[in-house]
């Protein structure tokens, strides 16, 4: 039987979001998901835009960080 349970890896340990029912011992596979950046790339922040979009440029400092995967 295959069972997938979400968890978090931190400081060398894996913390499961729930306790698997009916499993006392089992082999497991751990897949690390790519984390998204919490800051905009330097290429985006250095972009100067075009004269027609100068209004957008005035809001550059108010950009929210890109979304991260939420667990």
Image (tube, helix red, strand yellow):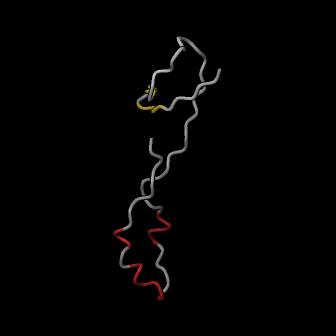
Q: Determine the residue positioned at 54% across, 44% down.
A: 34
For residue 4, which quarter of the picture? top right
Q: Determine the residue positioned at 50% across, 46% down.
A: 35
Judge from the rendering whether residue 13 lies leftward or rightward of residue 2; answer left or right: left
Judge from the rendering whether residue 31 lies leftward or rightward of residue 6; answer left or right: right
- Name above or below for residue 64 compared with residue 38: below
Position of residue 36 measured from the top left corner of the image (x, y, whole percent): 49, 50
Residue placed furthest toward the right: 1
Quarter of the picture holding the N terminus: top right
- Name above or below for residue 62 compared with residue 2: below
Q: Determine the residue positioned at 38% across, 62% down.
A: 64
For residue 3, which quarter of the picture? top right
Residue placed furthest toward the front: 21
Quarter of the picture holding the C terminus: top left
Foreground residue among 15 and 22: 22
Position of residue 49 measured from the top left corner of the image (x, y, whole percent): 48, 80
Position of residue 33 measured from the top left corner of the image (x, y, whole percent): 55, 40
Number of residue marks: 0
Residue placed furthest toward the bottom: 52
Residue placed furthest toward the top: 24
- Name above or below for residue 38 compared with residue 62: above
Q: Determine the residue positioned at 36% across, 79% down.
A: 58
């Amino acid at each position: 039987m295959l069972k997938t349970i979400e968890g978090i890896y931190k400081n060398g340990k894996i913390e499961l979001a729930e306790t698997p029912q009916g499993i006392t011992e089992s082999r497991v596979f751990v897949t690390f998901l790519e984390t998204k950046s919490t800051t905009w790339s330097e290429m985006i922040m250095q972009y100067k835009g075009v004269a027609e979009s100068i209004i957008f440029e005035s809001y550059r400092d108010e950009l929210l960080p890109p979304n991260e995967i939420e667990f």
